Image (cartoon, rainbow, N blue to C red):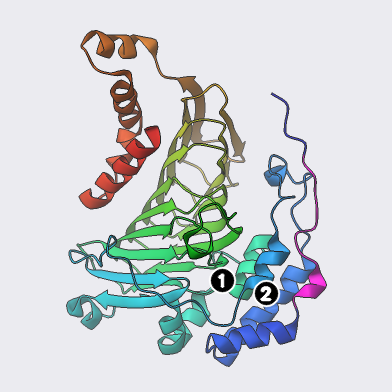
Amino acid sequence: MPIVNLRPAPLVKSGELNREAIEHYSASQNDPDWMLARRLEALRVFRDTPAPQRSDELWRRVDLSTLKLEQILTAITSNSSSATMPAEVPHPSSASGWVAHVNGTSTGTYLNPELAQQGVVFTDLATAIQQHGDLIQKYLMTECVKVSDSYFAALHGVYLRGGTVLVVPAGVHIKEPLRTLTRMTAWQPDSFTHTLVVLQEGAQATLIEEFTSDPVEGPAGNSSARPPQVLVNGAVEIILGKDSQLDYISLQDWGRNVWNFTTERAHLYESATVHWVLGGLGARFTKTLLEADLLGPKSTALLSGVFFTDSKQQMHIDTQQNHIAPACKSDLLYKVALRDESRTVWRGNIRVFPGAQKSDGYQANRNLQLSPRSRADSIPGLEIEADDVRCTHGATVGQLEEEPMFYMATRGLPEVDARRLMVEGFFAPVIDRIPLEETRERLTSEISRKIG
């Protein structure tokens, strides 16, 4: 199948974002002076950074010509819409702590008092900027994700608003999961949520984040009105000190009018471990850049993903496993199911830097096509600059096997139920890695709904 003809176009004119506008925006967020300075520096970088073009390898399979970024940025207002969490998404009572956001504004936070006494910081970004300014200045877009990384990372640095900060002091083990619930109400034009996680030496934690938006309807409930495009431009920064361990689960179910761009990176120091699980179900378009940098010897990155697309959804996931220190391990397993005319592109790379001997890297992308009109592209890659390593990769694209389907039919199982069992079984090895039963059940339920 030929590559879709791409029409490169400037997403927004550099002169349309100016210092005065950003100063006004910063004032509406009650930013301290240092945060305003960060936004203005991001603005400078953004204006100097060319928009993605078809000549860029990471973007050559992406058509951004229909993204009305200029219109979306114009719609950003000084004050976020006020809202409360809906009844069907209650505040979790079993968690060690929770943070809830609507439209970039915190609607509530909780942290177990015992953890607070041990020095754990778990709160929304706006509160962290005001109450833990020195800490945020040290880590916010200075070490992991930087405004110089890309066009969308720079734009995120200009407008970042809302999000979660977790800092766990050395030696503190948080047994029960911490959770965040982030949603947008219908017709909210943007989200610039930011997640910052810092675990100091020997710390352990589990963080589960869920991102959703309301079903889109026209004004006054008129479902025939065409919904506006929505921009989600997020970032995730994970910094893990020596011997620390983080389980991080991120589940995305944005509405079908959302263009979702995220830049996500983890820095792992000596003997640190991250188990990073992504779940992608929603959004009209997703482009995720995810990177694990193994900076300390014997660090480990386990990367798992569950993605299900239907209709005309597109998901583009770019992963990078960087073995910079010796004796590190990375293991990636992403599973994708596709229906209708949807499309997914996974582009993964393992890079072993000079001197990173004894590296052990693996990546696999398994795709299950449920429609002949869907398309899955898998592009694994290896860059090896050391001679004592073990690095392998694999990618598969296939359909439901006829023999198991026939077997279940002979046992009287309807075809739709047989398909559901096959797809759920396909995803089960990844979903079973999620530590919270409630989250596993919710993800399984959403997958079942998409199967139909």
Tag 2 near tag 1, CB within 8 Å: yes
How packed mark 2 is, by other alpha carbons closer than 10 Å (few <14, some 14-19, many 20 or more), is many
Look at the image and tell me in which quarter the C terminus lies: top left
Q: Nearer the viewer, mark 2 or mark 1?
A: 2
Q: Residue at x 70, y 83 (%)?
A: 21
The foreground one among 170 and 10 is: 10
Q: Which residue is mark 2?
A: 42
The foreground one among 361 and 282 is: 282
| In the image: residue 393, left or right of residue 209 | right
Q: Which residue is mark 1?
A: 141
The foreground one among 329 and 423 is: 423
Dot 1 falls on a residue whose secondary structure is loop
* Above or below 323: residue 235: below
Dot 2 falls on a residue whose secondary structure is helix
Q: Amino acid at mark 1?
A: Met
Q: Residue at x 61, y 72 (%)?
A: 157
Q: Amino acid at mark 2?
A: Ala
Q: Where does the magenta region start and end?
A: 6-17
Q: Is residue 150 visible?
A: no
Q: List x then y, in percent, for residue 400.
A: 41, 19
Look at the image and tell me in which quarter the N terminus lies: top right
Q: List x then y, in percent, for residue 365.
A: 48, 32
Mark closer to the chain start, 2 or 1: 2
* Above or below 262: residue 431: above
Residue 96 lies within the magenta run: no
Q: List x then y, in percent, for residue 110.
A: 26, 76
Disc 2 to disc 1, how far (Cα)? 10 Å
